[in-house]
């Protein structure tokens, strides 16, 4: 049985006062992609809805110009 972690995660972008998420910042965006290449949900990342939308949009843009892969090998 897994231990339950009931602690509320805090949005990384709100806590560090980051206003915009750049699609060229691949190192930051890789934290929000799992090993298969899917975008991690809000419950796992702890992002607020505003920043989660910005992260997903930045990841999709980075994929289109091939900075990030669509799927892992």
Image (spheres, helix red, strand yellow):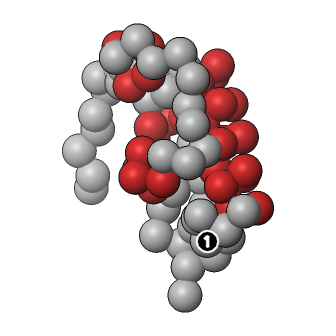
* 22 sits left or right of 61 in the view: left
Q: Is residue 52 visible?
A: no
Residue at x-position 72% and y-position 52%: 60
Residue at x-position 71% and y-position 40%: 57
Q: Nearer the viewer, residue 8 or 63?
A: 63
Q: Residue lying farthest right?
A: 64
Quadrant where the C terminus sits is bottom right
Query: Based on the displayed image, in which of its 4 quarters is residue 54 positioned?
Result: top right
Q: Nearer the viewer, residue 7 or 18?
A: 18
Residue 14, percent from left and from top = 43, 14
Residue 15, percent from left and from top = 35, 14
* 20 sits left or right of 15 in the view: right
Residue 37, percent from left and from top = 57, 67
Residue 63, percent from left and from top = 69, 61
Q: Residue lying farthest left?
A: 3
* 66 sits left or right of 34 in the view: right
Residue at x-position 44% and y-position 29%: 46
Read off the residue under disc 1. Answer: 69
Q: Nearer the viewer, residue 26 or 42?
A: 26
């Amino acid at each position: 049985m897994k231990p339950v972690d009931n602690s509320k995660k805090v949005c990384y972008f709100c806590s560090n006062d980051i206003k915009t998420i750049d699609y060229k910042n691949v190192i930051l965006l890789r934290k929000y992609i799992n090993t298969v290449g899917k975008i991690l949900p809000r419950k796992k990342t702890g992002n607020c809805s505003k920043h989660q939308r910005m992260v997903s949009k930045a990841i999709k843009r980075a994929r289109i110009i091939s900075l990030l892969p669509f799927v892992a090998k």
